[in-house]
Image: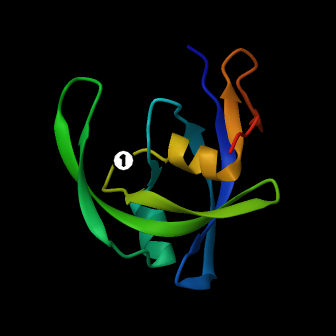
Amino acid sequence: MGLTAVTLVLKNAYNPSKAATGKFMVDSGAAFTVVPQNMVKKLGLKSTYEKEFSLADGTVIKRQIGSAFIKYKGIETSSPVVLGKKDDSALLGVLTLEALGLVLDPFERKLHSAHLML
């Protein structure tokens, strides 16, 4: 299985002067983007609600959801994000990819502009 990592700039949606840059694994099987705990603290991200998630092994976990501005190669959008706990990996999920108008090419392991339809 090939892995694709990208560098993203994240900003606090309510205080855009707080920004951080990090490497995120593109996970086309994950709905939400997961922001690592250290970045959550640095940005001062706050929870607006909680969701349950099923992991690949069937384990069900709960995580807090917040909002962030996410920028990739000059494209910036707001997106709901999982506020990661200790040891949660940085993941770029499908909701954010779609908001950015991007799609993962699994053969080239690169992000490309999506062919969007209304």
Q: Could you say which is closer to the camera, residue 14 or residue 113?
A: 113
Query: Which of 16 and 5 lies nearest the eye of the viewer?
Result: 16
Q: Position of residue 14 (x, y in %)?
A: 52, 84
Q: Is residue 60 above or below residue 51?
A: above
- Whether residue 93 can be seen here: no
Residue drawn at x 76%, y 19% as measured from the top left: 108
Based on the displayed image, in which of its 4 quarters is residue 11 positioned? bottom right
Q: Is residue 39 left or right of residue 6?
A: left
Taking the image as shown, residue 85 lies to the left or right of residue 93, namely left
Image location of residue 105, percent across then percent down? 71, 24
Residue at numbered disc 1: 88
Res 5 → quadrant:
top right
Where does the N terminus fall, quadrant-wise?
Answer: top right
Which residue is pictured at 49% across the width and 74% down the height? Answer: 42
Q: Residue at x 44, y 56 (%)?
A: 36
Q: Is residue 25 shown above or below 86?
A: above
Q: Secondary structure at mark 1?
A: loop
Residue under the point 37% across and 76% down: 46
Q: Is residue 94 above or below residue 33?
A: above
- Looking at the image, the residue that sits furthest to the right is 74
- Where does the image place residue 90, in percent across and percent down from the top left? 49, 47
Q: How has the structure been colored for display?
A: rainbow
Give the residue type that dot 1 points to: Asp
Residue 30 visible in the displayed image: yes
Q: Position of residue 93 (x, y in %)?
A: 51, 42
Where does the C terminus fall, quadrant-wise? top right
Q: Residues within 10 Å of mark 1 (few under 14, many from 20)?
A: few
Q: How many marks?
A: 1
